[in-house]
Image: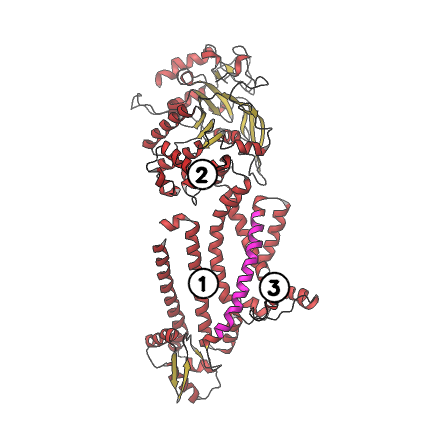
Amino acid sequence: MTDLSKSGAVGEPVRAGAATPSAFLDVRDLRIHFPTDDGLVKSVDGLSFQLEKGRTLGIVGESGSGKSVTSLGIMGLHTVGQYGRGKARISGEIWLDGKELMSADPDEVRRLRGREMAMIFQDPLSAMHPYFTIGAQITEAYRVHHDVDKKAARKRAIELLDRVGIPQPDRRVDDYPHQFSGGMRQRAMIAMALVNNPELLIADEPTTALDVTVQAQILDLIRDLQKEFGSAVIIITHDLGVVAELADDILVMYGGRCVERGPAEKVFYEPQHPYTWGLLGSMPRIDRDQTERLIPVKGSPPSLINVPSGCAFNPRCPYADVPKDGVTRTERPELRLVTGGEGGRHHSACHMSQEERTRIWTEEIAPKL
Amino acid sequence: MFAYIVRRLIAVIVMLLVVTLVTFGIFFAIPKLTGADPAALYVGKQADPATIEGIRQKLGLGEPILVQFWDFVTGIFAGRDYTGGGTTVRCDAPCFGYSFRNEQPIWPVLQDRLPVTLSLAAGACVLWLLGGVTTGIVSALKRGSVWDRAAMTIALSGVSLPIYFTGLLSLAIFSYGLGWVNGEYVEFAVDPAAWFGGLILPWVTLAFLYAAMYARLTRATMLEILGEDYIRTARAKGLREPVVIGKHAMRSTMTPILTILGMDLGALVGGAILTETTFNLPGLGQAAVKAISDRDLPLILGVTLIAAAAVVVANLVVDLLYAVIDPRVRLS
């Protein structure tokens, strides 16, 4: 991951950077708003991040934090097939391999979809068409982007099914999705996403709908395939365990914005945002005393229509009353570089001083985890 | 798939037998139970007692009800003789009863009337599917647009306006006013052009009513399907939007349309009474109306059975098509 902060000194707000992107995927100030009868829903409101090939970024947050909306936004799926009202308003820049997608011709973006960037969805049963065979759905994905005959495409589908660990792929290729088990379906979904060797793979909650026993297998598979294909992977989840398993970097989203991001080990072991602490506190851990109860993050996610004017997390923040120097309640905290962050890549958006946060983490939070 | 077809066919045969039994029971047993004399009903109130007694014998009304039913069912396959009052009437197979009112077997009447009704239903069906489904899809894709609102308003009026209004209006304009078509029914084999000319107004009138319903159904279904995850997947693959709609969304949208279509077509065969009456088409519906006003019970029974058979057969066809479309039906 190339950091955004090269231009900024420590503690300076980070802004969308240079004109030419250096990263493979460079998302700058992405805003995705949906007009509704109740008002404008700001699902994603100024999100920036970068991702290199061969790296995995975990985007973490609770329901409604804008994770999935972000992934669909990168794929350009908010702008196709949005018939009639409810059309998304999108702004910002998405650079993929040197191409800017937001200003690109929609048909050009369509040709990138499935070929350069592919997606694995949460529930493989509903994400696959019930009336077409697994093979038909994979070959279709292949033949959109490759001028090959049915036979060659079928061979490719069988090859991919074999690669993702489907037994007897030459027979099961003619099965329908409902004839597969949940784990097998997700494997088939992965095969479908990988059939064109995409350079960017977005996995949106890939294990949420699966049995716990199957989850680990799927995560292993994604990791192995990433090594093999060398693609950039974004894994979207509410489950920090999944991220711990896979991600090189972590981006924590809250209320449509990034509240903390950095290398996985930094975010896990030296988190710099109260929301991240809350997430860590609510995560079950094998090494934790069994008698201790998990601590949920109090309150409910913010309304994305009337986002609090200051820090979006303020109403739920246990440290909202900690005095902050020269900051008014209505001021929004900017994403700032954390001093001593590895390679200057660890950022967080909190009004508390870094000293204060480090003190709270080491003295109050970490010992309880 | 083969086992499925066999299963469905057996179900259809059982269903037809049950329908026949129930219909037969209603028409033959109820008058008996209520004390009315069915034989008197067949010939009208003014018939003399000797004629009535003859018919009673011919129908075997003195026999137990199950024997009467058995005679009726075997008559369908083998034909039967009605003997009584010193005379015998032959009713060739398939014998669906004998109208003592008109002194003729029922089957030739049905045979005569069925093609008219089938022509009406089939032609109207083609029109309303083309019109209704297309309108529904475009409305769904342009939800909230002027087109959508206009189409749905017209559809609402189409659903609300009865056939005898739209039918008479179209007759007044195109037949009596402009003189473009004449309302006479001509057999297809005799003169295809005249057949078409005689049916075009009933087709359009009937299709307008159904197209309105199908447009609303298609729109609602399409909107629901477009929100499905697998449609998003299809787009994520990079498929062109026409393929996403035409292949992925349409395939799923067809299922509920097909279900309704089976029922509607089946019901139309027995029940296009208003259309046939409005346009004076000599079809089954009109025969039924006449039979009712004549109290010609055997003819009513015959029409009812044909109508019931049409519904059952149409549903069988739908079920088989269902299996073709939806693999989950086929394999479960």
Which residue occupies the foreground of this view, B140 or A142?
A142
Q: Nearer the viewer, mark 3 or mark 2?
A: 2
Callout 1, which amino acid? Val
Q: CA distance from mark 2 to mark 1?
A: 40 Å
The chain that hosts pointer 2 is A
Residue position marked by numbered label 3 in the rendering: B200
Residue position marked by numbered label 2 in the rendering: A139
Q: CA distance from mark 3 to mark 2?
A: 45 Å
- The reply to whether discs 3 and 2 touch (Cβ–Cβ < 8 Å) is no
Locate residue A278 relative to residue A102 in the image: left or right: left
Q: Nearer the viewer, mark 2 or mark 1?
A: 2
Residue A357 locus on image (x, y percent): 45, 14
Q: Which residues are magenta?
A: B109-137
Q: Is residue B84 among what the camera can see? A: yes
Which residue occupies the foreground of this view, B169 or B302?
B302
Magenta segment: does it hold B84?
A: no
